Image (cartoon, rainbow, N blue to C red):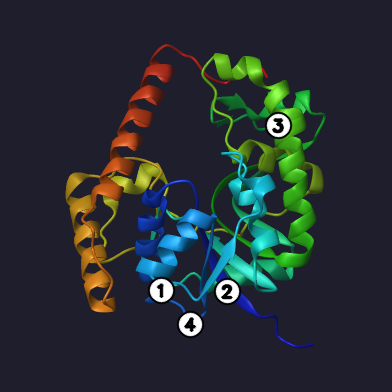
């Protein structure tokens, strides 16, 4: 059997800020892989890439129009993928070590996310939702609690799986969970992945996790990383953030790519600080774990 052709994908649509982060992510990833790196984007972002960053990405694919509804962007990755197998790395990530090992998970499952497959015996908070209550509401025995910033997939089977994510999000999750959103829960792409992934019995990537989780952020040393992937999902200490920005600037200069300053990452950090403050407020007043 021939070896599948493989590559990495990232995503940028709707704002050039995401493209600037994607450029930094791709340059950090190139230090740790020989596989090609592709960008999935909309037409305006594609035009900027062609004119400003023609040598950063190996391929450029246009995201299908049906997947451009805000939280559904990632569901279009399989349709846009140019390879048999791919690893997706979100634009708001920086790669600190090798990630190629994630392809190994595809020996056992057509799509593998970071996270855990929960049963009703386990009740966890996922974006303000009780996972047990989600399982009860949608009549499933398992829930795939995941972070969608990093996953691997086989293109052909993932196309139909991701379309299931899309249809569930639009037809079931949005109308069925509207009341919980008013109470402070957040409906991102991961809720549909969790429910459909549980229905299908999708297996998560094996531990140890490749990604730093928020509880580990205070211990991150960019010069001596203990994990290969940093996803900007929580505010970083100022010294760590400054070091990462210095490294990103140096990579751009070494690659002959213009450094526009760190404003795109500063905006992300500001947003994360607001999110963290909101989460602390919700926990203080015990808002969360909503009944769907």
* N-term-proximal mark, 2 vs 3: 2
Q: Foreground mark, 1 or 2?
A: 1
Q: Label 1: how many residues lie within 10 Å, few (<14), some (14-19) or many (20+)?
A: some
Name the secondary structure under disc 2.
Answer: strand
The quadrant where residue 228 appears:
bottom left
Q: Position of residue 155 (x, y in %)?
A: 72, 66
In the image, 17 versus 84, the foreground residue is: 17
Badge number at residue 54: 1
In-front residue for pair 20/113: 20
**Which residue is depicted at the point 58% across and 65% down?**
61
Q: In percent of the image, x 26 and y 62: which residue is there?
A: 222
In 3D space, how far apart are the residues under numbered discs 1 and 2 (Cα atoms)?
18 Å
Q: Residues within 10 Å of mark 3 (few under 14, many from 20)?
A: few
- Given contact means CB atoms under 8 Å apart, are the residues at marks 4 and 1 in contact? no
| Dot placed on the residue nearer the N-terminal end, 3 or 1 | 1
Answer with left or right where residue 61 lies relative to residue 58: right
Q: Pinpoint residue 170: horizontal percent, then vertical percent.
A: 72, 33
* Residue 118 appearing in the image: no
The CA distance from mark 2 to mark 3 is 38 Å
What kind of element bears circle 4?
loop
Q: Secondary structure at mark 1?
A: loop
Label 3 sits on residue: 121
């Amino acid at each position: 059997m021939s070896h599948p052709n493989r590559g990495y994908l990232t995503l940028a649509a709707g704002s050039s800020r995401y493209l600037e982060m994607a450029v930094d992510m791709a340059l950090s990833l190139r230090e740790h892989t020989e596989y090609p790196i592709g960008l999935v984007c909309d037409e305006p972002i594609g035009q900027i890439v062609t004119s400003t960053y023609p040598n950063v990405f190996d391929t450029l694919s246009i995201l299908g129009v049906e997947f451009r509804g805000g939280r559904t962007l990632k569901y279009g990755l399989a349709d846009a993928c140019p390879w048999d197998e791919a690893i997706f790395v979100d634009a708001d990530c920086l790669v600190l070590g090798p990630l190629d090992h994630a392809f190994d998970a595809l020996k056992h499952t057509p799509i593998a996310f970071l996270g855990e497959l929960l049963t009703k015996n386990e009740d966890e908070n996922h974006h303000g939702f009780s996972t047990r209550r989600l399982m009860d509401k949608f009549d499933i025995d398992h829930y795939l609690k995941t972070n969608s910033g990093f996953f691997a997939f086989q293109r052909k089977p993932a196309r139909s799986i991701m379309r299931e994510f899309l249809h569930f999000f639009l037809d079931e999750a949005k109308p069925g969970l509207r009341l919980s959103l008013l109470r402070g829960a957040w409906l991102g792409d991961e809720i549909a992945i969790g429910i459909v992934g549980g229905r299908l019995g999708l297996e998560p990537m094996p531990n140890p996790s490749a990604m730093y989780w928020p509880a580990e952020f205070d211990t991150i040393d960019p010069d001596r990383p203990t994990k290969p992937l940093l996803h900007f999902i929580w505010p970083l200490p100022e010294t760590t953030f400054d070091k990462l920005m210095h490294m990103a600037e140096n990579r751009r200069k070494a690659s002959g790519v213009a450094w526009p300053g760190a404003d795109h990452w500063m905006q992300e950090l500001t947003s994360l600080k607001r999110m963290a403050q909101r989460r602390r407020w919700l926990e203080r007043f015990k808002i969360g774990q909503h009944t769907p």
